[in-house]
Image (tube, rainbow, N blue to C red):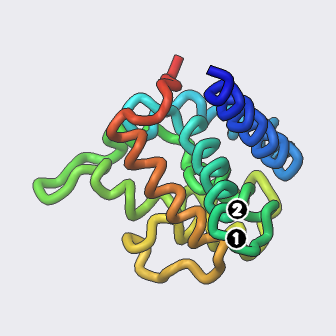
Amino acid sequence: SGRKAQLWQKKLERYRTIQRQIEKSAPDILQSRNFRRTKEYLQHGNMTVNSHVMNVARYSIALSDMLHICCNRRELIRGALLHDYFLYDWHKNKIRPSRFYKFYELHGFTHPGTALKNAKKDFRLTKREQDIIKKHMWPLTVIPPMCREAWIVTAADKYCSLMETLHLHGKKTKK
């Protein structure tokens, strides 16, 4: 009906507005070779790391808008895009598992540091962007986020991860 069409049109416009904000805030990240490599790795379920971080950036913007949280939008977006910039397939064991753990079980604890190290190598990061990347796995990272942008990305990441793991997000699979 006409009402449904109007709602879809409004959603599409909102999506396009958010996408333009992402493109304006992070052209260097989006165009970098290593960031494009995130399309090669699966994250949750059938979702690639690239699709996941794009979702987290979109939901971070939506969450800050919905809750009227004043924050640095550029740093929010850049931190969201780089929060899982670990650049490896975490589903494959990189070290020999002991009888107490497997590598993929440690990934949740270790990948924020790896992502931060990789991001610092490839991009100039603000303190806020670093906090977003380093603390997005709180409470697994014992020290909580120190800025509202990091709290927003942490919340958006948890939501997106759940939706992707349960296969409730769109099917953007590794090709």
Q: Left or right: 119 with respect to 143?
A: right
Q: Residue at x 59, y 50 (%)?
A: 56
Q: Residue at x 74, y 42 (%)?
A: 14
Residue 48, horizontal then vertical, whole percent: 51, 33
Q: Amino acid at mark 1?
A: His
Taking 112 as reference, is 173 above or below it? above
Q: Residue at x 37, y 33 (%)?
A: 167
Residue 168, horizontal then vertical, whole percent: 40, 35
Q: Left or right: 34 with respect to 93?
A: right
Between residue 136 and residue 116, name the one nearer to us.
136
CB contact under 8 Å: marks 2 and 1: yes
The disc label shown at residue 109, or none? none
The disc label shown at residue 65, or none? 2
Residue at mark 1 = 68
In which quadrant of the rendered view does residue 63 lie?
bottom right
Q: Amino acid at mark 2?
A: Asp
Query: Can residue 132 be spotted in the picture?
Result: yes
Residue extending farthest front = 2
Between residue 56 and residue 15, name the one nearer to us.
15
